[in-house]
């Protein structure tokens, strides 16, 4: 019986299928372009290879082709006769995931890795900011994600993929020197790992290393395929650093060429969250944002997130609707009760409505209770700076500079030397 790169037995006799399968898994783990083609070659070499169809399903998910993903996992389900228990379980986990059962899928993943800790295509589902733990809406989700990756370290601690996702989890709990070391180790093993590059960028952001981060990412991005999963989001990181340094031309270039929904090849979730966050942070910093950009994002949100339920997307869609003046779309989100952190979505949506009206006292009143636990909404610390900086802006607009200074010093000291809010002087 053949084995994959991680030593897991595979129910195929085709050497060619295994080689293509390993390539596809590597593309998934590194967020590089080519997974769909690799898994297609694996299936061509052995049409009865169930896990190649599971890989094709995962690749289709990252291509935002949910119909294709469901069809691929259904084909895998029809091929489970005579394959190993691990492979049957993997098919079942992806079936749960694609059936819209995230709680059950997470429970199955956590049980699965106890027996098969090197089954990375399964383990990957619960890692990263947008994994089942990251988007759970639970209090303490960052610690839970770190606990999950830490459990894998004794089994995969020399692997470039796990070093990067464990480093991300370490970064999000504030252990920055350790996180940077893990990223450097990961990238030394595989410099093409976009997850490693991405999480290194997050760590440098948290360290306040704007110059170093901007230089690093600019160099690394030269070799990254524009069609790859993280190109748009890494462009967002570049744009944020340009904005912090007052380089408006570069910020707009990154937005137009890599972040805007018409330019980005990212998933819809990234397109709405990155686009709305960058435009609003540009406005906070004092730049003029063309109204048509807000209208474009609002229309995109209405197309792809018409029904509230994904809380992290919802707060960004609400921002786009508020700034575009679409009160009806904003109200649908503010009044919704679905989603893993729906109790926080409503006040954030109403905050954006107040901001758009220039009612800073109402915006502050709505936003303040959210600040105690906004990690439940999802996203990284860098992404939730959208809320932190809005809170500072509200305080500034209400003449509460001393309180704004205390907020920065106690909540986000990374900005102590330079807060990207118009009128704020450290």
Image: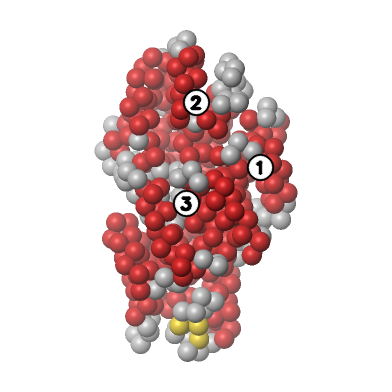
**Number of callouts:** 3
Q: Are marks 2 and 1 in contact (CB under 8 Å)?
A: no
- What residue is disc 3 on? 169
Q: Would you say residue 419 is visible in this rendering?
A: yes
| Sequence-wise first label, 3 or 2 | 3
User: Who is closer to the viewer here, 112 or 19?
Assistant: 112
Label 2 Cα neighbours within 10 Å, binned few <14 / some 14-19 / many ≥20: some
Badge 2 is on which residue? 409
Q: Nearer the viewer, mark 2 or mark 1?
A: 2
Q: Secondary structure at mark 3?
A: helix
Give the mark, 2 or 1, whose residue is nearer the N terminus: 1
Measure how far apart labels 3 and 2 are at the Cα level: 23 Å
Residue 73 x %, y %: 40, 70
* Residue, far top: 399
Q: Quadrant of residue 253?
A: top right
Say whether residue 355 is left or right of residue 202. left
The quadrant in which residue 22 appears is bottom right
Looking at the image, residue 400 sits to the left or right of residue 290; the answer is: left
Earlier residue among tags 1 and 3? 3
Residue position marked by numbered label 1 in the rendering: 213
């Amino acid at each position: 019986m053949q084995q994959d790169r991680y030593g897991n037995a595979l129910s195929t006799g085709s050497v060619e299928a295994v080689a293509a399968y390993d390539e596809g898994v590597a593309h998934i783990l590194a967020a590089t372009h080519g997974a769909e083609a690799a898994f297609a070659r694996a299936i061509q070499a052995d049409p009865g290879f169930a896990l190649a169809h599971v890989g094709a399903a995962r690749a289709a998910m990252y291509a935002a082709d949910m119909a294709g993903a469901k069809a691929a996992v259904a084909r895998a389900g029809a091929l489970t006769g005579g394959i190993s228990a691990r492979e049957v379980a993997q098919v079942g986990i992806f079936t749960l995931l694609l059936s819209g059962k995230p709680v059950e899928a997470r429970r199955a993943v956590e049980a699965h890795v106890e027996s098969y800790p090197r089954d990375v295509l399964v383990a990957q589902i619960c890692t990263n900011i947008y994994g089942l733990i990251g988007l759970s809406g639970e209090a303490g989700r960052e610690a839970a994600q770190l606990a999950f990756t830490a459990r894998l370290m004794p089994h995969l601690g020399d692997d470039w993929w796990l070093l990067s996702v464990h480093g991300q989890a370490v970064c999000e709990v504030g252990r920055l020197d350790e996180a940077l070391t893990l990223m450097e180790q990961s990238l030394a093993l595989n410099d093409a790992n976009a997850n490693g590059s991405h999480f290194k960028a997050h760590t440098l952001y948290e360290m306040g290393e704007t110059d170093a981060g901007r230089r690093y990412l600019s160099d690394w991005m030269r070799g990254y395929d524009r069609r790859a999963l993280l190109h748009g989001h890494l462009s967002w990181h570049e744009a944020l650093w340009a904005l912090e340094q007052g380089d408006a031309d570069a910020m707009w270039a990154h937005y137009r060429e890599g972040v805007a929904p018409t330019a980005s090849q990212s998933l819809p979730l990234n397109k709405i969250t990155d686009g709305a966050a960058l435009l609003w942070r540009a406005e906070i910093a004092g730049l003029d944002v063309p109204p048509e950009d807000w209208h474009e994002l609002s229309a995109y949100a209405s197309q792809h997130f018409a029904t509230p339920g994904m809380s992290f997307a919802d707060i960004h869609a609400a921002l786009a609707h508020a700034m575009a003046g679409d009160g009806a779309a904003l109200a649908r989100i503010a009044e919704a009760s679905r989603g893993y952190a729906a109790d926080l979505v409503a006040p954030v949506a109403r905050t954006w409505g107040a901001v758009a009206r220039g009612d800073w006292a109402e915006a502050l009143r709505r936003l303040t209770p959210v600040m105690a636990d906004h990690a439940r909404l999802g996203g990284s610390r860098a992404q939730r700076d959208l809320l932190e900086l809005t809170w500072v802006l509200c305080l500034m607009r209400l003449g509460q500079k001393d309180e704004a200074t205390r907020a920065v010093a106690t909540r986000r000291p990374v900005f102590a030397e330079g807060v990207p809010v118009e009128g704020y002087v450290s």
